[in-house]
Amino acid sequence: MNKLNLDYVPKEVFKYKEYLDFMESKKVRKGKDTTYTLLDFVTEEQREIDKKEKSIINNLTSYDPTPKEIQEHFNFVTKTFNYLKEKYPNDEYLISLENEENMQIIKCSFDWYKKYGIEK
């Protein structure tokens, strides 16, 4: 069983603002052309080539420029958060991670899960 350490102060795993700036820098569709999807990271020309080659018509994840380490961290915290929410449904800290805007950044980019004795 994991040992709770609710006094643990989460540390930053990556700088969220830098991640957002990086993602913004990778966009090829901006302004009125923005779709707010992964299609913003691919040119129309490349998309047409992909459609003709039928390589990634239904899978847009290949257009996601998120660095692999950050994708893996997102996957880990999502899985961990869901597990902990089920185990501790009334936990105030977990509820705040889910509902408070500033805590969304903590949820995504800090090692908050160590409070619950979970290591990555």
Image (cartoon, rainbow, N blue to C red):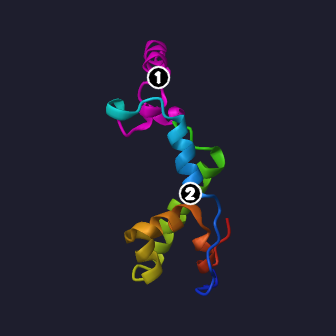
Query: How many labels were placed on the picture?
Result: 2
User: Real-space Cα distance between discs 2 and 1?
Assistant: 26 Å
Residue drawn 47% across and 77% down? 87
The percent position of residue 66, horizontal first and vertical second, equals 57, 43
- Please state the horizontal and vertical placement of residue 62, each as a whole percent of the image: 53, 33
From the image, tell me which residue sits under label 1: 43
Q: Which residues are magenta?
A: 35-63
Disc 1 on helix, strand or loop? loop
The dominant secondary structure in magenta is helix
Q: Earlier in the sequence, mark 2 or mark 1?
A: 2
Label 1 Cα neighbours within 10 Å, binned few <14 / some 14-19 / many ≥20 = some
Q: Is residue 86 visible?
A: no
The image shows residue 108, relative to residue 2, as above or below, that is above
The residue at the far front in this view is 31
Q: Residue 34, labelled with which disc?
A: none
Residue at the far left: name it: 32
Left or right: residue 104 versus residue 21 is left
Q: Picture coordinates of residue 98 (x, y %)? A: 41, 69
The residue indicated by pointer 2 is 16
Above or below for 56 versus 20: above
Name the amino acid, label 2: Tyr
Provide the secondary structure element on which disc 2 rests.
helix
Q: Which residue lies at the image location 60% right of the left edge and 56% below the top edge?
A: 73
Which residue type carries mark 1? Thr
Q: Position of residue 93 (x, y in %)?
A: 47, 80
Q: Is residue 108 visible?
A: yes
